[in-house]
Amino acid sequence: MAKLAVAMSGGVDSSLAALVLKQAGHQVVGLSLRLGAGPDRAWSAGAEAASQIGLEHRVVEAAGPFEQRVLGPVAAAYAAGLTPNPCALCNARVKLPLLWETAREMDCEALATGHYARLETTPGGPRLAEAEDRGKSQAYFLAQVEPKLLARLVFPLGEMRKEQVRRLAAQHGLAAAQRPESQDCCFLPPGGWDEFMAQRGAIRPGVLEDAGGRELGRHQGLHRFTVGQRRGLGLAMGQPVYVTGLDGERAAVRVGPRTELATLGLEAVQPLWHRPPREDEVLTVRYRYSHPGVECRVELNGQGLRASFAQEQGAVAPGQLAVFYRARTIVGSAWIDKAIQSVRIGTT
């Protein structure tokens, strides 16, 4: 059997992943990141979970890289009128690379996590795929992980459903079995995003305006808004209005009726392909985690791409991750730079 490391946060998923591998006869060690931001309890909770299972455990210090590679870019993105994806950034730039580096130093053959995702074996190497539990699948958040690192990852929960994981954890008496799922970003201070942005001097008040540039009101921070948002605008317009665009240069929030959210495609940058799309190949793209996906054709251009949707879609938020699939397998991803709108309503 192999010596494996497991990324442990103290939650039910990572705890059961570690137990499953130990019961399979592997030599298992637990690793937890200390991020130095927000509540930062995962490293101590991971240590407790590892102790209960009877595993060696090590804490990996990650405060510097986390600030440089995730927190700084996230704050800058919000201040520029973008909607970043912290989890996708962290998985690809901090969490998995740093944990694997430590695992390798400990002579481990692979790094396991409690993510709901699968790896499919292909002649070109492992390909990331959706988990069996589609409702809980986290493959989207792993789409920016480098292909060479995928070959060193293991996802023990990829074929399980969430209710099965909780049931097994309870049957084995794991303390994490009843722990609720975290719904917020792990690094946020008590004051949430407002406090996070204020700590970095990145709060940018500005105007609320319509498509013609007419001022409708004022807002207290560009980071509070994302394209497609309806709540929290503080406007009485006599009809539902949505955020239709964010102007980072002026810290302006454009609002309008739902029809102004209609999109025909997107432009994205910094693509990471496991296999570049063939000419006229039809793929499926999800342009946010909760999006079910839409068929598209992808045109590569220089350092970016243009994806044209088969059917008109709703709000596309610049800064989010566009993930491209063939069936349930991820073939690539890129960061959204611009929405291709059905009706021209101004500059995004």
Image: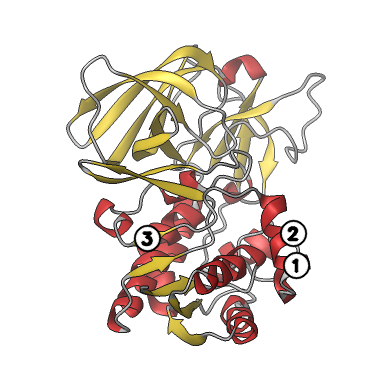
In the rendered image, residue 219, in percent from the top left (x then y), is placed at: 67, 45
Q: Is residue 150 above or below residue 254?
A: below
Kindly identify which residue carries mark 1: 171
Closest to the camera, between mark 3 and mark 2, is: 2
Give me the C-alpha separation between circle 3 and circle 2: 25 Å
Q: Is residue 96 above or below residue 225?
A: below
Q: Are marks 1 and 2 in contact (CB under 8 Å)?
A: yes
Indicate the amino acid at tag 3: Leu
Q: Earlier in the sequence, mark 3 or mark 2?
A: 3
Mark 1 Cα-neighbour bin, 10 Å: few <14, some 14–19, many ≥20: few
Q: Which residue is mark 3?
A: 153
How many marks overall? 3
**Residue under the image location 24 percent in, 56 percent down:** 148
Q: Where is residue 106? Give x, y as percent.
A: 32, 84
Residue 193 location (% of width, % of height): 63, 59
Residue 213 quadrant: top right
In what quadrant of the picture does the C terminus appear? Answer: top left
Q: Crowdedness of circle 3 by 10 Å Cα count: few (<14), some, many (20+)?
A: many
Q: Mark yes or no: residue 179 visible.
A: no
